[in-house]
Amino acid sequence: MSGETARLNAFPVFMRVEGRRVAIVGGGEEALAKARLMAQSSAQIVIVAEAPEAALVEWASANGVAVVREAYEAGHLHGAALVFAATGDEASDGAVVADARARSIPVNAVDRPELCDFFTPALVNRAPVAVAIGTEGAGPILAQMLRAAIDRMLPPSLGRLAALAAAYRDRVETSVPKGAARRRFWKSFFAGAASRAIARGDEASARNAAEGLLSSDGVETGHIALVGAGPGAEDLLTLRAQRLLMEADVIVHDALVPEAVVAMGRRDAERIHAGKRKGCHSKTQAEISELLVELGRAGKRVVRLKSGDPLVFGRAGEEMSALRDAGISYEIVPGITAAFAAAADFELPLTLRGIASSMVFTTGHDLKGRALPDWAKLAISGATVAVYMGRSTAAEVAGRLQDAGLSPDTAVAVVENASLGNRRLAHGTLADLPALSERDDMTGPVLTIIGDAVAGANFDRSEPLAARKRAAARV
Ligand code: SAH
């Protein structure tokens, strides 16, 4: 029914267990699972088992947990805050449940929901922050799936951030007025410089940032994250990139970043399209750098989304130096560069024992000059060469490398739209490579890999690079 929430038959609460006894009766797998779960708390765990299994004994001694090797009797429950009946035997579990209830101690019987006073949650632990997921026993697998999804969303440093917040609570309460100002303080604290410093493990800077917020009435300064969006597939984004996208006020993205990836950002984030596919109007690099500086000055949290890795042919250098000069805080989030995605699509080992042990990332644009660039020597000595933006320079790359002594038979792999559903793979030799610049059917971004390691690739889904040319010549 719309607008009406179904009622829970089991209501979640957080129970204080610090220093209190939790009794687990049973010596097998079930007991160990509950002991592991409870060991995420500061409860004092006591396992009661006359003949505990080896795995349980080993875990208990490694974790400083007591195992009482006696036949169970009701007295073992004395003083417990919670009891688990985990003997694996229905009658024994039933007896433990009856004893616990007689002492008014809440009890859980493993895999016997009808005997349970409480259920244990699937737990995302960022102590002191916890997310507990319950399904009233209906779907443990569902709970685990939700747990994994939530776990990915929450930064590992969340607990440390919450602990720092707790340390500031009293001061904030006395010095920041209740209401809008205090809300603004905490929002800035949890999403701003303090949180970023904690994520880096820099507690001193986090405290500085918090002090700054206390004296500035919670006005946050801007921050730019130069984020690698990966080669295009949404699920090749890093968890950190995804988190930042969800927190961003503004997303500034390149043309090569697919809409589906940009759409993973916060729904009300402003989106700015910065550039550049051949022929379309777009901002110059100087304009983009200036834009980032302005957004930072305006206090925005900006994700500057670049395809692949931001530090590989991403012009991050110019943007970083503009931000540094303007004194605006920034960070880099690495991404999967196109060469890695292309190699994965081709099942192509970029390094191959005894054949290729180094790798070159290049554009081939430096081949247009007269001097042979350094990397040509590396190619001849066996390095695997990844050529970015290499369609228009394909003929030069092939010609100059052959002039320099690389065999025309050297294997070449080309991937258009690496990682995406519409990817296309082509292969051939260095002698075939000039055909790439004539392949006007390949309109997506193209990455070329040259070297003997290419021979280790899987060519099942690949077409010959120069096929069209040969077919045309035959006519
Ligand atoms: N920073 C990016 C590279 C930007 S330069 C990275 O690390 O991948 C743009 C070039 O990257 C394109 O001309 C093309 O050569 C390559 N490229 C980017 N995405 C690609 C993809 N999905 N498939 C093939 N090549 C890609």
Image (tube, grey):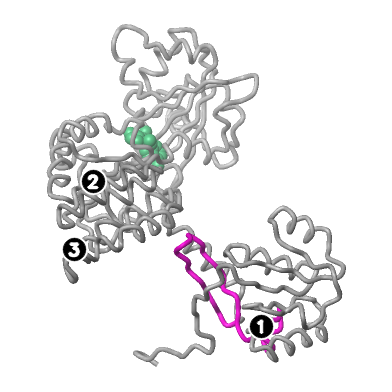
Q: Which residue is mark 1?
A: 107
Asked if the stretch drawn in magenta spans residue 124, the answer is yes
The N terminus sits in image quarter: bottom left
Q: Nearer the viewer, mark 1 or mark 3?
A: 3
**Mark nearer the N terminus (2 vs 3):** 3
Give the x, y percent position of residue 312.
36, 31
Q: Quadrant of residue 22?
A: bottom right
325 sits to left or right of 159 = left
**Mark nearer the N terminus (1 vs 3):** 1
Q: Amino acid at mark 3?
A: Val
- Whether ligand 1 has any atom under 8 Å from the Cβ at mark 1 is answered as no
Q: Which residue is mark 2?
A: 223
Q: Quadrant of residue 297?
A: top left
Q: Nearer the viewer, mark 2 or mark 3?
A: 3
99 sits to left or right of 395 = right
| Residue at figure coordinates x 43%, y 8% from the top left | 403
Q: Amino acid at mark 1?
A: Val
Give neighbour class at mark 3: few <14, some 14-19, many 20+ (Cα, 10 Å): some
| Residue at figure coordinates x 46%, y 33% from the top left | 414
The C terminus sits in image quarter: top left
Asked if the stretch drawn in magenta spans residue 77, the answer is no
Part of the protein shown in magenta: 109-136
Q: Which residue is mark 3?
A: 176
Q: Which mark is residue 90?
A: none
Is 3 located above or below residue 34 in the figure? below
| Residue at figure coordinates x 65%, y 19% from the top left | 354
Q: CA distance from mark 1 to mark 2?
A: 49 Å
**Mark nearer the N terminus (1 vs 2):** 1
